[in-house]
Amino acid sequence: MWSENNGLNSNELKGYRGSTYELLKQIDASIGDMIEITKNGENYLGGLMPRSESGDDQHIVIKIKSGYNIGVKIDSTTKIAKIGAGAKPTFIRPPSPDHKEDLSKVDIISTGGTIASRVDYRTGAVQPALSAADLYSSIPELSDLANINAHILYSELSENISPHHWIGMAEKISEVIKSGTDGIVICHGTDTMSYSAAALSFALRNLPIPIIMVGSQRSSDRPSSDAATNLMGAVAIASKAPFAEVTVAMHGKSSDNDILVHKGTKVRKCHTSGRFAFRSVNASPVATYNIQNSSLKMNWDQYQKRDSNRKLNLEARFNDNVLLLKSYPGMKSELIEWAIEKYSGIILEGTGLGHVSQNLLNAIKKGIEKGVFFCMTSQCIWGRINMNVYTTGRDLLRLGVLPLKDMLPETALVKMMWTFGQTTKLEDAKKIMITNIAGEMSPRTLPEDVSQ
């Protein structure tokens, strides 16, 4: 346990300890003060920032004029001077804007993620912290787009989202729709947002209004954050979109030009950190929202139209006793044999047109004879499976493996969970899986669908 004078428990120098703490105390500095660090003939000027408590004791972190944080390693030649007292890093929620009768009503439901987060200076990690109300009140431009009602449903990083949370989201959306609203925005972490979008696409049948899922690739404390523009775009889309479907709205490029609106069952996160991470797969985006002129262009002609008189059918039941298995060279049949003892259904993410190694066929046959439901998707990003072309594919078809056309593996997994939530009968499950319920399967895959 660190002692009080090492700075770990000090409000003035949160996170600093050891030699850096002593140097900062000598110049009577505290978090937020402007300090100048001179090292190797270079001068660094900025506001003193808190440190991660789990970090080392050799660096001082300052926020420079550009808005970025830098860490300067301190040695015996380093000089530090306090330039002046600065504003302490705090979050003060501004008052909400007045209601405007001429604007649509949009409800924002927060589930957590980077779009609703700040930096935790105890660990240096990004943690869920901002509520949906905080987001609304801290982005005043929202008041010109819609009248907002804010709800905090969860404060979860998206890797922690489970089918239990999907049920909660669907039920909350149903509740909000019944209370009366023109559109709903779901703030969600990006890592598993496509899974949740697929789940809601199946669980919310006969939607009357648009459901727009939105996230942020870069947290709000970063100058390059896309949180504000993504949220503003999502609210604008929810308020004016002519469709009544579950979609994902995220940056189309690195620049603040367009936000692409993706169908909830045809979208995948394709980049770890880029603003342009989300892409429609085997489909074009449903719509494009231009940030500069606030216009929405529909790219699809056929979609379920907005209709406030339509009654929502809530079918939010999921059974997670299913597995997604990715085929790979050298995959052992023992893995299949283990899986068929544990799970009721297995989505195979096969190679190419829908293949797995022939050494797995006996284990798959054993599982099918046992009553385990096997479906096939492809690990290729674009295109569709065709198991009639090569011998292995035909063998799998003869065994009873069900091909799922161009359905994404993630969407197929979610759909199988949802399917087993609706029925326990295998024949009924097969019919549901090959029925195009929420646009998860395209009638054909066109070459132009791969470019966005």
Image (spheres, rainbow, N blue to C red):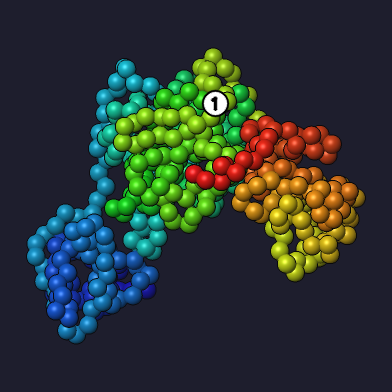
Query: Which is nearer the eye, 191 or 331?
Result: 331
Quarter where residue 103 is shown: top left
Looking at the rendered structure, the number of numbered marks drawn on it comes to: 1
Q: Can residue 93 be seen in this view?
A: yes
Image location (x, y in percent) of residue 79: 14, 78
Image location (x, y in percent) of residue 354: 75, 52
Q: Residue at x 51, y 37 (%)?
A: 285
Q: Residue at x 44, y 35 (%)?
A: 288
- Which residue position is annotated with label 1? 301
| Amino acid type assigned to the residue bearing label 1 in the image | Asp
Q: Residue at x 48, y 23 (%)?
A: 242
Side of 41 relative to 401 (left or right): left
Query: Which is nearer the eye, 241 or 338?
Result: 241
Side of 398 relative to 273 (left or right): right
Image location (x, y in percent) of residue 322: 73, 49
Q: Can residue 344 be seen in this view?
A: no
Q: Residue furthest bottom?
A: 76
Q: Which residue lies furthest to the front in this view?
A: 447
Query: Which is nearer the eye, 143 or 375?
Result: 375
Q: Few, some or many C-alpha atoms within 10 Å of disc 1 (few <14, some 14-19, many ≥20)?
A: few
Query: Which is nearer the eye, 21 or 173?
Result: 173
